[in-house]
Image (cartoon, rainbow, N blue to C red):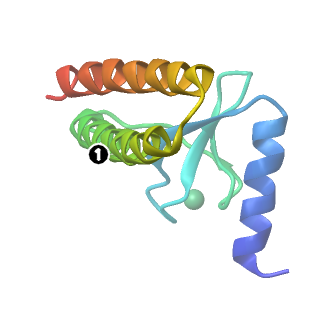
């Protein structure tokens, strides 16, 4: 197995064990960091605990803003595919489902845009 495959496997094992993927990256290897159920933050690639020093707050905000626009992009993509489905939809049930999904997507988009710095 390559080094990359090993770390992907490690990451999925972590997720299965209840760890959450953070929006921060390891300062050494740029792998997404994970928070264990115990509260510890670790880098699955370096296999070590990561403690954030003071002064990383600015960096953190930048990463958050980045993930917000990523989310916005994803939502817009979904809106586009929902619209395509709507064109093809024929049954009232289908149309209703798509309408609800679209409403939820627009709702979320609005929230995402408001949360932008
Ligand atoms: Zn690392």
Seen from the viewer's position, the closer of residues 107 and 44 is 107
Q: Where in the image, quadrant-wise, is ligand 1 located? A: bottom right
Q: Is residue 95 above or below residue 24?
A: above
Q: How crowded is mark 1: few (under 14 residues within 10 Å), some or many (20 or more)?
A: some
Residue at numbered disc 1: 66
Question: Residue at the location (79% across, 68% down)?
Answer: 6
Quadrant, the N terminus: bottom right
Q: Is residue 20 positioned above or below 81 on the image?
A: above
Q: What element carries label 1?
A: helix
Say which quarter of the image contains residue 24. top left
Q: Position of residue 85 (x, y in %)?
A: 50, 43
Residue 114 % position (x, y): 18, 20
Q: Residue 76's image quarter?
A: top left
Q: Residue shown at 69%/74% (left/top)?
A: 4
Residue situated furthest left in the rendering:
117
Left or right of residue 26, residue 103 in this image = left
């Amino acid at each position: 197995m390559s080094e990359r495959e090993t770390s992907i496997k490690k990451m999925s094992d972590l997720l299965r064990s209840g760890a959450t993927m953070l929006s921060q990256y390891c300062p050494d290897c740029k792998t997404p960091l994970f928070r264990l159920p115990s509260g510890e933050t670790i880098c699955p690639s370096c296999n070590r605990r990561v403690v954030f020093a003071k002064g990383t707050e600015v960096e953190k905000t930048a990463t958050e803003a980045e993930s917000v626009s990523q989310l916005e992009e994803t939502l817009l993509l979904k809106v586009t595919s929902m619209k395509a489905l709507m064109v093809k939809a024929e049954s009232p049930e289908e149309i209703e489902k798509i309408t609800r999904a679209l409403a939820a997507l627009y709702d979320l988009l609005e929230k995402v845009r408001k949360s932008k710095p």
